[in-house]
Image (tube, helix red, strand yellow):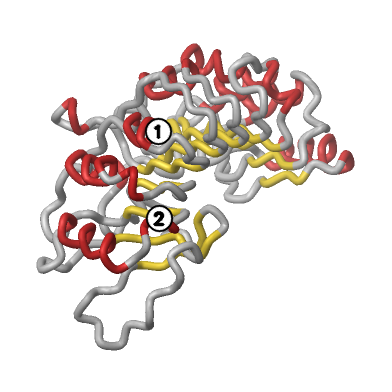
Amino acid sequence: MTGIDHPETFHGLPVHTLPDPDDEHAAPLPWADSVAWRLDCLWNENNPFPQLWSRFLTSVDSTQVRALVLGPWWHDEYSPLRPVLDLIVADADRFPALRALFLADVTGEECEVSWLEMTDVTPCLEAFPRLEELTVRGCGDAVSEQDTLSLRPVRHEALKVLRFESGGLPGSVVRAVGASTLPALERLELWLGVTHYGGDATVADLAPLLSGGAFPRLSHLGVQNSEIQDEIAAAVASAPVVAQLDSLALSMGTLSDTGAEALLGGQPLTHLRDLDLHHHYMREAMQQRLRNELEPQGVRLNLDQADYWDPEDDEPRYVAVDE
């Protein structure tokens, strides 16, 4: 899971991990509404998640909690997310102030993203109607269908930020996002990943998102970490949604000169504040063309992590996050 770290902040709040009850040096707990609370069971066999959850509810005023970050929910052998999510959803009425939820803040040292057995995350949106931010990390390539990442089309009036970080995002999730009614949505990020890990989304699946009619308040769109990044760039080049965006991310994937040529030949991008293309396979000449066209117009361009690629070679291109 290269390049994925634990966030220091979430929803504008510093992340604070609930300390182990046996930690004699732990500082006093902060005010419930002053931090994003992170729950972590890893390497502590005496602290299974149901016990940790119960301790959290008794030691922190849950009615004031604004953001919740779920770290590793297992202590030894990995276990699926579903029963843990069921616990959180069952206690939703105890969190009237919750505005942000991060499912699976897990790094590669703890579990590879493709090994994280997820579940249907729709109940989170249904149980927390005031939620403004949802981040989900994990893949969909699980043995059990119940433990595969999924989403059903949903109507949610408050959600402003939706982010799926995956090495293989199922196309069904992309289609469900496009079929959802999210009138407040401002930021959407989809890490599509690779087919080997269940990332079977196509450009056709993205069509509702690119139409410009799905989310009227959308100002940032990220369609990233894809092995079909050139095809996505070609679709984005003529996508109506681009005109309403302040920032666009087509980063972390296999973008080459082909995709960049499509972007340059498409609709103007000079209204963007930021265009993130980092981790790409464009040659220096193409990078300079992008700089010459966009930077004088005030576009902040991210072309970091360039990897030279010769289309006449058989060397494969890689996304930033797969396994």
Residue at 71% x, 30% y is 245
Residue 268: x and y, percent? 81, 24
Assign a secondary structure to mark 2. Answer: helix
Judged left or right of residue 8, residue 27 is left
Q: Where in the figure is residue 300, as x and y percent of width and height?
A: 76, 46
x, y (%) of residue 225?
A: 48, 36
Residue drawn at 52 percent across, 35 percent down:
159
In which image quadrant can residue 76 be found? bottom left
Q: Residue at x 45, y 39 (%)?
A: 319
Asked if marks 1 and 2 touch (Cβ < 8 Å), the reply is: no
Q: Secondary structure at mark 1?
A: helix
> Considering only order in the chain, which callout, 2 or 1, is on the residue closer to the N terminus?
2
- Which residue in the protein does label 1 denote? 125
> How dense is the environment of label 2, judged by Cα within 10 Å: few (below 14), some, or many (20 and up)?
some
Q: Which mark is residue 63?
A: 2
Above or below: residue 131 compared with residue 26:
above
The answer to which image quadrant residue 134 occupies is: top left
For disc 1, the neighbor class at 10 Å (few under 14, some 14 to 19, many from 20) is many
